Image: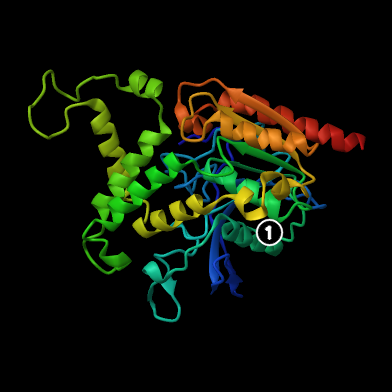
């Protein structure tokens, strides 16, 4: 395989263990916690060029580059991270971590409980977005990074970016929120609830105790992923991609097998998902997303953001009905009322919520301009 010269190249997932217990928002104290993370670029001598990139719901720490020369796919945001890309590895030290409760290296329900020698399962404590940010902060402390040049995230990653700005306002110099919201709508919560119910209703879930069994709740997890994918697209994207085309046939079968291409697509997405994700992690992470509501916690969104010193860039997509532009504009209006430095762009796209992963060319121009302006303003101060 020939690796593009702008790529982050061959990268390695690293691990850091937080030995002390962390108090979660629920009041539970939990630890130790191992954090999986990757870095791209170099940390400068002043340690002030670090950018934290945070993944979405089912992502991981592998945001860019390749793990080996035989890798078929690069990291999930490889189009945005690398030499002369949005997050330029010649200028910045990029950090991406796997979320607390995940299943790609960071401690989660599938991890071994050192006290029992068995997987935590549902004895793993329920956590919040604020708790995930506490864990990331511990990693940054270990890396001796006292300030972030920027924090950026899309979808659930954007929620964590919002929380990072709120929890550590003095630490963040700029923030980029993409296709995200300050709280889920009832409709979005409903979709998460149906996804969780499909897992819990799977007889192989066994109250979360399935790790030592040959039979996993694959059907429930697959269905949850299918439901999720429906929300990631939009009507236009569905029509453009599938229409009412049949899958490998010219007529209806008049049974309950797959007839339409869209059915086949969802089935495929569900099947490949169970090979890389843990059902219990899906339950915990979607619940954390449901709970996220800084306006409720702090009394208002203005109170939540009032201490922030960051410059903000907020990006939404006109076809995103899961986290619509009106929710992004609520954040923008709040920041404007507080007199914060905020830029906003709504990108036209037929890709729905998935646009934050697909519309990299347009996003690149916007993010590059924002970060470069940020640099020039600092040089002139």
Residue on which disc 1 sits = 140
Image quadrant holding the N terminus, namely top left
Helix or strand or loop: what does disc 1 sit on? helix
**For residue 117, side relative to residue 329 (left or right):** left
Q: Residue at x 23, y 56 (%)?
A: 202
Which residue ends up furthest to the bottom in the rendered image? Answer: 115
Residue 379 in percent (x, y) is at 88, 36
For the residue pair 138 and 190, the one nearer the viewer reads as 190
The part of the image, by quadrant, that contains residue 213 is: bottom left
Q: Quadrant of residue 366?
A: top right
Which residue is nearer to you in this view: 349 or 290?
290
Residue at 67% across / 47% down in the picture? 300
* Depth check, front residue: 218 or 319: 319
Is residue 329 left or right of 248 when viewed as pictured? Answer: right
Could you classify mark 1 by the number of other residues whose Cα lies within 10 Å: few (under 14), some (14-19), or many (20 or more)? some
Position of residue 108 measured from the top left corner of the image (x, y, whole percent) = 45, 63
């Amino acid at each position: 395989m020939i690796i593009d010269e702008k790529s982050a190249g061959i990268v390695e997932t690293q691990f850091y263990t937080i030995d002390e217990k962390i108090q979660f928002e629920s009041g539970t104290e939990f630890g130790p916690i191992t954090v999986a993370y990757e870095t791209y670029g170099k940390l400068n001598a002043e340690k002030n060029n670090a950018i934290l990139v945070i993944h979405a719901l089912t992502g991981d720490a592998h945001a860019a580059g390749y793990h080996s020369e035989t890798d078929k796919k690069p990291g999930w945001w490889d189009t945005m991270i690398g030499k002369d890309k949005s997050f330029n590895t010649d200028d910045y030290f990029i950090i991406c971590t796997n979320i607390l409760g995940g299943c790609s290296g960071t401690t989660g329900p599938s991890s071994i409980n050192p006290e029992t020698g068995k997987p935590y399962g549902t004895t793993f404590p329920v956590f919040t977005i604020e708790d995930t940010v506490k864990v990331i902060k511990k990693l940054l402390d270990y890396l001796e990074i006292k300030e972030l040049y920027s924090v950026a995230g899309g979808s659930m990653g954007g929620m964590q970016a919002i929380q990072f700005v709120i929890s550590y306002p003095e630490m963040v110099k700029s923030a980029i929120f993409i296709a995200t919201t300050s709280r889920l709508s009832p409709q979005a919560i409903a979709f998460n609830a149906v996804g969780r119910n499909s897992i819990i209703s799977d007889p192989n879930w066994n109250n979360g105790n399935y790790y030592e069994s040959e039979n996993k709740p694959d059907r429930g997890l697959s269905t949850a992923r299918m439901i999720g994918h429906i929300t990631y697209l939009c009507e236009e994207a569905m029509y453009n991609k599938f229409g009412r085309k049949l899958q490998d046939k010219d007529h209806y079968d008049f049974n309950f097998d797959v007839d339409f291409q869209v059915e086949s697509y969802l089935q495929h997405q569900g099947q490949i998902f169970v090979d890389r994700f843990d059902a219990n992690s899906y339950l915990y992470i979607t619940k954390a997303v449901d709970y996220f509501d800084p306006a409720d916690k702090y009394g208002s969104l203005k109170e939540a953001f009032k201490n922030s010193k960051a410059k903000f860039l907020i990006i939404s997509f006109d076809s995103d009905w899961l986290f619509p532009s009106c929710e992004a504009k609520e954040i923008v209006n709040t920041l404007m009322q507080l007199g914060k430095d905020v830029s906003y762009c709504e990108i036209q796209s037929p890709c729905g919520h998935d646009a934050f992963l697909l519309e990299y060319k347009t996003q690149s121009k916007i993010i590059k301009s924002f970060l470069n302006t940020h640099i020039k303003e600092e040089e002139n101060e």
